[in-house]
Amino acid sequence: MLDIDDSGSISGGHLQVREIRGFEKLLEGMELFKLPLITSRICGVCPSAHHLASVSAIENGLGVKIPADAELLRELMYQGHILHSHALSTFVLTGPDVLVGIGAKPEHRSILSLLSIAPEIVKKVLRLRSIGQKIVEIVGGRGVHPVTSVPGGQTYRPDTDEIEKMRQWGVQAGSLVKELSDVFMKKLENILDLRKIVELPFHSLALSDNGKVTFMQNVCKVVDPSGEVERTFTVDEYSDNLIEHPMQGSYMRSVRLRSAGAERKYFVGPLARLNVNSSFSTPEADRLLADFRSGGSPRLSAIDYLEARLIEMMYCTERIVEICGGELRDGPVITEASPAGGRFRSIIEAPRGILIHDYEADDNGKVTGANLIVATQNNYDAIDFAITALAGHFRQSGDDNTLMNGTEFALRCFDPCLSCATHAAGSMPMRIELRRNGRTFGVLRRGADIDQDNNR
């Protein structure tokens, strides 16, 4: 939805998500220990994130400490997951915007179009995605909806041959990330004039391991737009620091920082992680991060998400090699855990940003309440800001196709996952309502008409 003022300029933009959110209600009455399998079904793009957030929440509530090798196996699976997810976002979804051009016709802005233009590049992209997915399959038991992480640890340890195979894949993936990044960054220079237009005047929120990027459980750190640390909090304190809000015409809720004054807007994800933290734990990713931050920190443009994902992919490949190259030993991978009642919470970094799982269960281990806060909710305000900014810029062209392309590109910078945020299935058509003084005076459509679909 775009609001147009009397001069014809765009004064506001808002993403309306009309698919109903209801997964939390479905969890009520479920057995606590089944949640890691059930919640991974929320999404086919980031099932590993929900799988690990769920099992970590249960272990936190029970006070269970898993063996060191189990932690490494989970990290290995997750590095493969993030590599796969970032490759999908960067090269398959956003790639055509950058490599073909935002102004191109919709049918030319797709991976199939890229296949005809640059087949060797597309083959390397698909190989990179495949490596990430195969690692998840080996460690997690399935490429989609993993099953091996259970309260207490892991149910499966890869054998020596599988570990060596994954190490070799990690080396190969590192070479692919470097080669593809060189191509992507060169093309990205063509749209750098848009960077200031979508500069977000918001805080950055991410997990931090004493200044190092981490995807697994740790302390949440908030950095303001000037780079100063505004606050830190733990998983047990998240509800004291974050507050959810219903949004007009949408089943997806936004999340903001509680404050004594006005609530503060923020964003999460790869860009926030690189703003909050000053290092990784691997050499090439550290070099890339230093270069990224050398132009000033924090980086606040929505377009900076694209470069941030490339850096994180390099980190994933390095950690895969390190874990499979000697860190993973032959110790135990599971310890005893039994269901109980109580409160169960965790915060991890999904590929798209902060993911919170929060359950309550009775003494029989049955879930009595659940709340899930996903990355796309955390980015809602930032998405609306970017939509408004880029739509306002591209409306000046007077071309509806360019306006819709620019609006789509604004969304894709954040890699939104509406299946996570709303827990709905089906097609995601695009409809832009042009409004003046609260009344719709025009509609731009791409794909099925949502209102017509709902009336069938």
Image (spheres, rainbow, N blue to C red):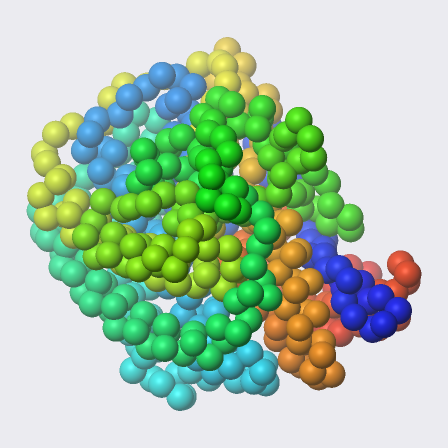
Quarter of the figure with residue 150: top left
Furthest residue to the top? Answer: 363
The answer to whether residue 417 is above or below residue 256 is: below
Residue at left offset 85%, top offset 72%: 7
Decide if residue 342 is on the left or right side of residue 138: right
Q: Quadrant of residue 104?
A: bottom right
Position of 39 relative to 7 (above/below): above
The spot of residue 197 in percent (x, y) is 60, 66
Q: Is residue 95 left or right of residue 314?
A: right
Percent across and percent down for residue 437 are 90, 61
Instruction: Please state, as top left, top right, bottom left or bottom right, where the N terminus lies in the image.
Output: bottom right
Q: Is residue 127 visible?
A: yes
Nearest the eye: 144 or 70: 70
| Left or right of residue 3: residue 208 | left
Q: How many marks?
A: 0
At a point 23% along the width and 63% down the height, the residue shown is 173
Instruction: Name the residue located 45 percent from the left edge and 26 percent from the top edge.
Output: 234
Left/right placement of residue 159 relative to residue 233 reads left
Name the image quarter holding the C terminus. Answer: bottom right
Please determine whether, in this image, residue 249 is positioned above or below residue 456.
Answer: above
Q: Nearer the viewer, residue 339 or 371?
A: 371
Task: Tell me residue 56's x, y (percent).
Answer: 38, 30
Residue 393 spot, x, y in % from top left: 66, 73
Which residue sits at x=79%, y=70%?
A: 9
Is residue 354 or residue 188 the one in the foreground?
188
